[in-house]
Amino acid sequence: MQRQDARAPTAQAPDELTREVVALATGLVSRMWAHHQARVAEFDLSQPEAKALLNLEPDCCLSMRELSAVLNANPSNVTVAVGRLEARGLVVRRPSAQDRRVKELQLTPAGSRLRASLLRRMTAQSHPLSRLSSRQQRELVRMLEALLANE
């Protein structure tokens, strides 16, 4: 039985192209996150509040449980964020017509307006992806969907 050299790599190192893709993707994510944080701050929202607001569609209800699942967040954290949005008059929380134990969330007219304004600001010309043409953005969407398909 041969002894393995302790300095020998146990796994094959990623190739140079993969390293370049990872470095560029990391840089893009960092820029997009900074852009996202700045836009959210303009509206005096916390990150959890913004995530909740952006995942509620106008004229559509989500239960607290559904929103927690969409956000991949602890229900108690979602409750705090929703409570703050409710205090600002941006969402209403009410019992479901099908099951009164379930709380449904709906954007108020003020919440719908703020959500639309936030989305406009997040996708404005200063957005990191704004340098891509519509065709390039559609191609990027297809590539990202392929990468995330098995998640």
Image (spheres, rainbow, N blue to C red):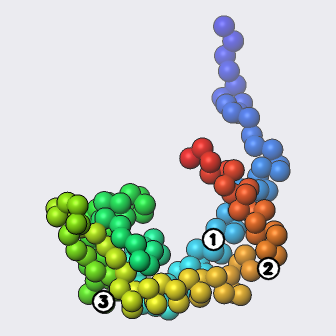
Residue mark closest to the camera, 1 vs 3: 3
Q: Amino acid at mark 2?
A: Arg
Q: Is residue 29 visible?
A: yes
Q: Residue at x 81, y 68 (%)?
A: 136
Residue 121 figure quarter: bottom right
Q: Is residue 143 left or right of residue 104?
A: right
Q: Are marks 1 and 3 in contact (CB under 8 Å)?
A: no
Q: Quadrant of residue 150?
A: top right
The span from disc 2 to disc 3 (Cα, nearest Å) is: 36 Å
Q: Crowding at label 1, few (<14), some or many (≥20) Cα neighbours within 10 Å?
A: few
Residue 81 screen position, x and y as percent: 32, 75
Which numbered disc, 2 or 3, marks the residue closer to the eye? 3
Q: Mark 2: few, some, or many residues within 10 Å (few <14, many ≥20)?
A: few
Label 2, on which residue? Answer: 131
Residue 91 lies left or right of residue 149; in this view the side is left
Which callout, 1 or 3, points at the residue further toward the start of the chain?
A: 1
Q: Which numbered tag is attached to residue 89?
A: 3
**Which label was assigned to residue 22?**
none
Which residue is found at the position 32% from the left and 68% from the top?
78
The answer to which of marks 2 and 3 sits earlier in the sequence is: 3
Image x and y of residue 143, in percent: 74, 56
Q: Amino acid at mark 1?
A: Ser
Which residue is drawn at the image coordinates 31% and 64% (left, top)?
Answer: 63
C-alpha separation, residue under disc 2 versus residue under disc 1:
16 Å
Contact, CB < 8 Å: mark 2 with mark 1?
no
Q: Nearer the viewer, mark 2 or mark 1?
A: 2
Could you say where residue 97 lies in the image, as x and y percent from the top left? 22, 66
Observer able to see residue 84: no
Query: Which element type, helix, strand or loop, lies under badge 3?
Result: loop
Quadrant of image for the N terminus: top right
Secondary structure at numbered mark 2: helix
Label 1: which residue? 30
